Image: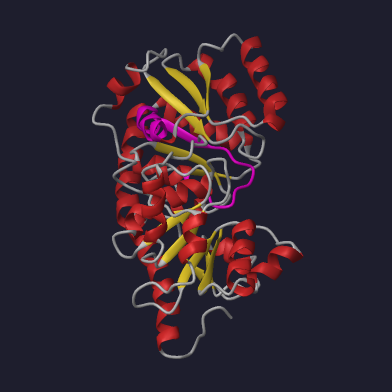
Amino acid sequence: MPSRAAPTASNGTEEKTAQNVRQVEVIVANLKRRFSGVTSTVLALLPVQSRRIRIAALGPNLPSHWQCITWRGLFRHGWQLPPGRRFRIWHARRNIEMLTGLILRSVLRMPLKLVFTSAAQRRRSAWSRFLLARMDAVIAASPEAESYLEVPSTVILHGVDTARYRPAEDRNAQWAATGLPGKFGIGVFGRVRAQKGTDRFVDVMLCLLPRYPDFTAVIVGGITLDQRGFADDLRAKVSSARLADRILFLDELPADEVPAWLRRVTIVVGPQVWEGFGLVPLEAMASGTAVVASRVGAARHLIVEGETGYLVDADDMAGLEARIESLMRDPAAAAAMGRRGRAHVEQRFSIEREAAGIQEIYERLWSAASDGRERPGR
């Protein structure tokens, strides 16, 4: 997933953006420069949420088509209340965003309520717990994430944009158009690193591709500086096996190109060792693509075992290989699994459902203020 250049704007556009802060009811903080899973979540939710409320993102390198505000606009107009509200909501998904919201609210006395979404499945540091205790509402992205929180929270599973992630009209034709070898694709999506299981995927492909010449594997994901050695070792292993033409490292692609690759491949593998949530299985199922994933993150809540995908234990390499091979051996069965996955996502995991759940949290805060039970800027 890529980082994106910040949109350039004329002085007139910046002034218009700043003026719009007066109308904004919810500010979504996205303060990390690199494109990440959090950014992907915001990218999916923001257009849907904007149909319900006046919402905008704040942060560096935001795509030009997002609804955005500037720091300049926030500091010029952030103390003015939005129409009909006693405060704005600041929605954070990282520690730096919680801290920034806390400074704005509690030090600078900006009229804000702070909402945090947590996907992490680990005991948090003392610093994180300090910040969490000062949030006005906390959302957990899965029951597992909720179990690590020491504050009251509401579980809202992530959804996926079923218009953005959709099945191919002709998957075979779309694969053929790539010019890559074989009739079918199999892919892993996410940053190239051990935590994401990229090495596990490569090892399985080294075993299976010689048996299934109709398949070619793609690895879609960025390589950070600290992972260059890891990636180089994987490339060397692939080259030694003389499979460099059938295991392709596509590196970090523009975000708009990733859904097309999820439609082109026949099988998506999620071999993570651990994961906070893990959106790729949802995105793959929405794309009508069969999924084999580790039983980590929220995968067990997303995949119906044997119907919309396969789940394997994170340390079960034999099981991972067996499940992948069963689909490579029978592409028609993989296609049928993909169709069931699409129907499952449409029924239970639409982005509209997630947005509605988040809206309930916002409305609860606003209603409490209207009833006199809460005061802004506590």
Q: Is residue 176 left or right of residue 34?
A: left
Q: Residue at x 46, y 58 (%)?
A: 73
Is residue 265 within the magenta segment? yes
Q: Is residue 367 above or below residue 323?
A: below
Which colour assignment does the render follow? secondary structure
Residue 355 visible (yes or no): yes
Give left or right: position of 106 versus 52.
right
Residue 222 in the image: state x and y as whole percent.
57, 31
User: Where residue 105 sits: x, y (%)?
Assistant: 58, 72
List the single residue furthest toward the left. 169
Q: Is residue 281 above or below residue 146?
A: above
- The residue nearer to you, when weighing 181 against 227, is 227
Q: Residue at x 36, y 54 (%)?
A: 16
- Residue 334, how many percent across, how many down? 37, 33
Q: Is residue 138 among what the camera can see?
A: no
Which stretch appears magenta? 256-279
Q: Looking at the picture, how far across and down is residue 213, in whole percent? A: 45, 13
| Residue 226 drawn in magenta | no
Q: Relative to the observer, which residue lies in front, 36 or 66? A: 66
Identity of the residue furthest to the bottom in this view: 372
Vertical placement of residue 32 versus 175, above or below: below
Q: Quadrant of the C terminus?
A: bottom right
